[in-house]
Image (tube, helix red, strand yellow):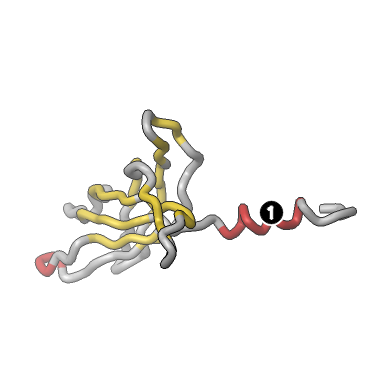
Amino acid sequence: MLGAPENSPELLHNHRFAGVTGPVIERPGGHVHILSVNSDFFFNHFHQIEVETGPPIPVRDQNGDIIGHVHGFTGVSSCVFFHNHIFKGSTLIQNPIAMEERNLSELPNHNF
């Protein structure tokens, strides 16, 4: 996932963050994930971010076929040095590691 706080001119700085989602948590009508990461480091501080994503949002290709899904999220970072940041972001469409593991397991006679 990728995200960034909303611009806060009065704070004279901003942060970015990236990470991976936690395991699937089943909910009626879909699933969500927990995101738990630290922001980047700026002027001797960073912020902790922990939030639950929204439900899956289908992603379609140019033919209208569903090729995956993403999750949106919003929240407020931890308070450090008397301030916090409102943030928003989205997950990415795929988990390349899972695809790689799946492809490796399909190979004959492998010893991984």
In the shown orientation, is residue 69 left or right of residue 74? right
Q: Secondary structure at mark 1?
A: helix
Up/down of 5 relative to 12, above or below: above
Q: Residue at x 32, y 43 (%)?
A: 54
Q: Residue furthest front?
A: 63
Judge by depth and name the residue closer to the eye, 109 or 22: 109
Judge by depth and name the residue closer to the eye, 27 or 17: 27
Where residue 87 appears, as percent x and y from the top left, is 24, 55
Judge by depth and name the residue closer to the eye, 47 or 34: 34
Where residue 102 appears, as percent x and y from the top left, is 69, 52
Q: How many marks?
A: 1
Query: Which residue carries the number 1 mark?
Result: 101
Q: Residue at x 44, y 32 (%)?
A: 26
For the N terminus, the quadrant is: bottom left
Q: Quadrant of residue 104?
A: bottom right
Where residue 16 appears, as percent x and y from the top left, is 33, 65
Where residue 109 appears, as percent x and y from the top left, is 89, 53
Q: Residue furthest top?
A: 28
Which three-letter amino acid code belongs to the residue tagged 1?
Answer: Glu
Q: Residue at x 45, y 34 (%)?
A: 25
Q: Is residue 67 visible?
A: yes
Q: Residue at x 29, y 68 (%)?
A: 43
Q: Residue furthest right?
A: 109
Q: Is residue 51 visible?
A: no
In the shown orientation, is residue 70 left or right of residue 103? left
